[in-house]
Image (tube, helix red, strand yellow):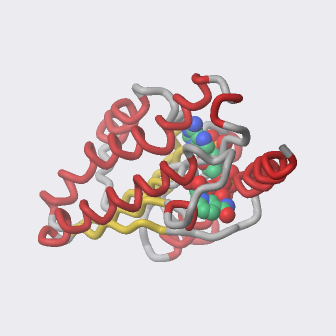
Amino acid sequence: MTGASSGIGAACAEVFAANGFDVAITARREARLQTVAAGLRERHGAAVHVFTVDHADPASAARLCEELAARGLTVDALVNNAGYGVPGLYNAVPWQVHEDFLRVMVAGVCELTYRLMPGMIERGYGRIVNVASLAGLVPAPAGHALYGASKAFLIKMSEALAHEGRPHGVHVTALCPVRCRNAVTRACRASMSSSARS
Ligand SMILES: NC(=O)c1ccc[n+]([C@@H]2O[C@H](COP(=O)([O-])OP(=O)(O)OC[C@H]3O[C@@H](n4cnc5c(N)ncnc54)[C@H](OP(=O)(O)O)[C@@H]3O)[C@@H](O)[C@H]2O)c1
């Protein structure tokens, strides 16, 4: 479960733990991950493995997979959830911010999936949930050049991989949430109201 230190990721980790899975959770804020982990252990008796990861780091997916292997963990279900919004018009945002965003929202998801899906196919069981958004299905407003595009990418990638995985017991799904209140939606609202004013 990537991005499990808050919001949808923490909630999904709760669902998996409640259904008998041991859970490996990632995010940058280690203290918050430890709090989530303690709650999951206490409420569900799950084994919870904490990995402090910045998914914007291009080396992070390979490193995470190495650390999982070093701890003897196999991943039966991968939830690519880590994500955020970047408020602002496309050219008003520094390129590095866009590059990090694309790494977290697109390239990192592709790489983790690429590295973990073969093991699922080999074992004949796997679940991959890519947390996309309704934003990937509807027209994109100003100030959202990459957010909706990144989510549309995940939806299309999930559709194709669902066909590839199904014969091997690996189900690939794009989840399209709508407006859960938190940091992401606050950033989107701020961006939309500033682009509406300009
Ligand atoms: N909220 C909504 O209404 C909504 C609607 C549609 C889709 N979504 C999608 O749902 C997903 C979860 O968002 P949320 O609403 O639950 O927001 P959230 O509460 O802000 O959670 C985002 C999670 O992603 C992690 N994250 C962000 N950047 C990261 C990075 N560089 N490396 C590692 N982890 C990172 C955050 O952890 P750290 O900050 O600790 O690193 C946090 O755990 C996102 O993909 C978002 O686009 C949300």
Which residue sits furthest front? Answer: 198
Considering depth in this image, is 133 or 127 the residue closer to the camera?
133
Res. 90 in view = yes
Q: Quadrant of the C terminus?
A: top right
Which residue sits furthest bottom? Answer: 19
Asked if residue 169 lies left or right of residue 195, the reply is left
> What x and y, as percent, mark residue 19?
46, 76
Asked if residue 70 lies left or right of residue 4, the reply is left
Q: Residue at x 22, y 58 (%)?
A: 120
Q: Residue at x 33, y 40 (%)?
A: 111
Q: Residue at x 58, y 69 (%)?
A: 177
> What x and y, as percent, mark residue 135?
57, 61
Res. 38 in view = no
> What x and y, as percent, mark residue 35?
69, 52
The image quadrant that residue 146 belongs to is top right
Give the vertical position of 103 relative to 150 (above or below). Answer: above
Q: Residue at x 15, y 66 (%)?
A: 124
